[in-house]
Amino acid sequence: MMPRITLKYLAAELGTHPSIISRVIRNVPDARVSEAKRQRILALVRATGYRPHHAGRSLRNRSTQILALIVPDVANPFYARLFRSVENTARMHGYNVILCNTDEDGDRFRDLIETLGAGHVDGWLVASAGGVDGTVPLLDNSGIPYVLLNRRSKAPHVPWVGPDDFATGKKGATHLLDLGHRRIAYVTAHLTIESMRQRFNGFRRAMAHRGISVRDELLVVGYLDQAIVRARTRAILRLPARRRPTAVFVSNSLSLDSVLDCIREEGMHVPKDISVVGYNPFDEARVTGVLVPVVEIGRIATDWLIAATGESATAQTIRVTLPVGFVDRGTTLPPRPSAGSSN
């Protein structure tokens, strides 16, 4: 039985990577392969009769009118709101959007780029949380325009749109400090993620300005694993009274429900027993906290990407930091006198 002819099959036959096969087929100028290898690839393509799924259309410079939004977790309300913004903007330009979930699995990300990059999409919108530096080469090699959302890269050629993460951390901390809190727990995803690191730096800077250090015992690093967030939060809430936090800043929207559940399970009430500040992607936010312009992030990034996919595209690399706001939803109060004054 004849095997199904795919990019992976062709790559295995030639001992190369599927993305190289794709770039040669699409005649990407900077495919970085020798002429001899290019001819071997094209000869195998002709011999096997391989064609991308979009059969009958030209393999070069033709638009699918489809974009792909790649996110780490579709269950995260931030990404749900982001997708709605991207989709609404894309439809105004006559484009459709495919939503792709990676669960921060590098192999899954690579498979998406290889599969959809074989002529199925015109551009990537990448909100993948971890390993941005590792994903950029894959995106570059795909030969398809892309933009990072809510993420950024130090590489000067990489386009991105995101909120002011440093200000996010600083605003959350300053609000609680102004109320008189000193023992503030901080909940974050992994600090190897640039945006998370910037939020934490802003938080730490505000604390240091008041002469307060961030205690390791009040730091919750959960990445995408909410079981870790819950276990660590419970441990913090069960500390002796003079070490227990009087407030918590949840710096990523995915962890908010986990933290609030733990507070309820411990018989505590917000804000009477503990104040909560959150990272809010919605105007109708449930908790006091930083208001992130997620709709604007999606709109600006999508507008730019569609312009960059045009045949005569002249769009300059976009690198936009958007200001964040703050909203009071009544989930913070000054610490109770019985909570003690120990720093």
Image (cartoon, grey):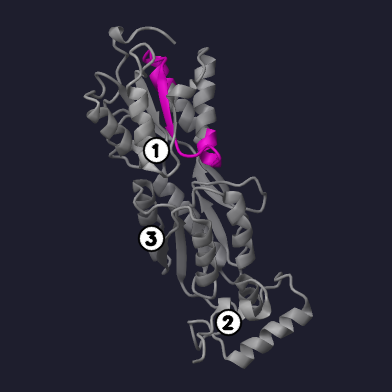
Image coordinates of residue 291 in percent, x first then y, are 38, 36
Label ID, residue 81? none
Point out residue 282 in the picture as x, y percentages from the top left corner.
33, 42
Quadrant into which the C terminus falls: top left
Q: Earlier in the sequence, mark 3 or mark 1?
A: 3
Mark on residue 87? 3
Which badge, 2 or 3, comes first in the chain's sequence? 2
Q: Secondary structure at mark 2?
A: loop
The reply to whether residue 204 is visible in this rendering is yes
**Residue at screen point 46% across, 32% down:** 168
Which numbered disc flags the more N-terminal residue, 1 or 2?
A: 2
Please name the amino acid that badge 3 sits on: Glu
The residue depicted at 32 percent of the width and 33 percent of the height is 259
CA distance separating discs 2 and 3: 26 Å
Q: Magenta segment: does it hold 113?
A: no
Q: Position of residue 169 (x, y in %)?
A: 47, 29
Magenta residues? 174-198
Label 1 sits on residue? 228
Few, some or many residues within 10 Å of mark 2 (<14, 14–19, 20+): some
Residue 188 inside the magenta-drawn segment:
yes
Mark 3 neighbour class, 10 Å CA radius: few under 14, some 14 to 19, many 20 or more? many
